[in-house]
Amino acid sequence: MPIEYLPIVFFLIALFYSSVGFGGGSSYLAILSLFLTDFYEIRSTALILNICVVTIGTIVFIKNRVFSFKMFWPFLILSVPFAYVGAQVRLSQKAFFLVLGSALILAGVFMLLRFVKQKLESKEFNNTKKLLLGGSIGLLSGISGIGGGIFLSPVLNLLKWANPRVVASLASVFILVNSLSGLVGLNMAGTFKLNQSLMLQLIVAVVLGGSLGSYLSNRKFNLKFLGVLTSILVLYVGLRLILLHGFGIKI
């Protein structure tokens, strides 16, 4: 696929992800890894796009009084500093793509689980569990450039911790604060790098897609088909990165 088509693809990704409270970082990273070779640029670009999309979603959730800071703050305490620390970790190119590939496979599995009906009993998270979950996802978020909501949201939904819209609002804010923290970490580490001409096109695409997705989410449109396709894409790219950078196998 020519790189000129990236804005269209990213528009569709932002459309789906924003409809469920995500930023799209996992898919941005997946696709960018097919076109770009500079992993600092890949990570920086994904964080910027994440911030653009979830800022829109966060505003919509707060405006509609879905988001609850009282329910959210324990997830935030460790996730923000850990995302900052993770973003400052200097990995070799091979190590980064192996970590990214593993994170993408995990993200793809979690995304698919979202569409599988589970019969688990509702679970109550104490603050210790919230702190540990938030901190571990925040660290992975900073290292890989994935906002983290794609891990947090399915876990909370599977455990029936709260209704899906509340969980989506928590995921949106979680991604926003961790992406901002990771961005600061990249700047401090001197590893923040962007292709400005491509970046502008992608920002326009994800802002349009994110705005439409946030609108559709509040109209309860079903974007399940697009979500399943996105999950499969993320799984494929994650596997491809591991085979290519870990074993030298191209698929």
Image (spheres, rainbow, N blue to C red):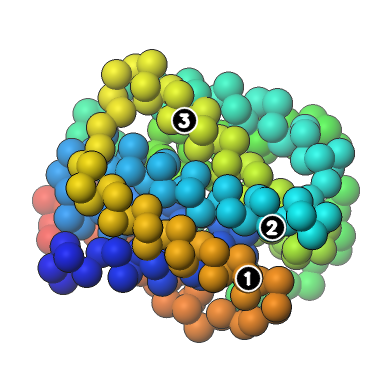
Instruction: For the N terminus, give its image quadrant.
Output: bottom left
Residue at left 45%, top 64%? 208
Compare marks 1 and 2 and give the one earlier in the sequence: 2
Q: Marks 1 and 2, Cα distance to the nearest angstrom?
A: 8 Å
Q: Which residue is mark 1?
A: 215
Toward the viewer: 80 or 98?
80
> Viewed as shown, does residue 11 lie left or right of 67?
left
**Amino acid of disc 2:** Val
Q: Who is closer to the viewer here, 143 or 18? A: 18
Frontmost residue, 214 versus 229 = 214
Q: Position of residue 250 (x, y in %)?
A: 13, 61
Question: Of 176 and 99, which appears nearest the observer?
Answer: 176
**Residue 85 in the image: above or below residue 232:** above
Disc assigned to residue 60: 2
Q: Is residue 148 visible?
A: yes
Choose the circle earlier in sequence order: 1 or 3.
3
Count neighbours of disc 2 (C-alpha within 10 A) and say few if under 14, some if 14 to 19, many if 20 or more: some
| Residue designated by label 3 | 182
Image position of 223 with respect to 231: above or below: below
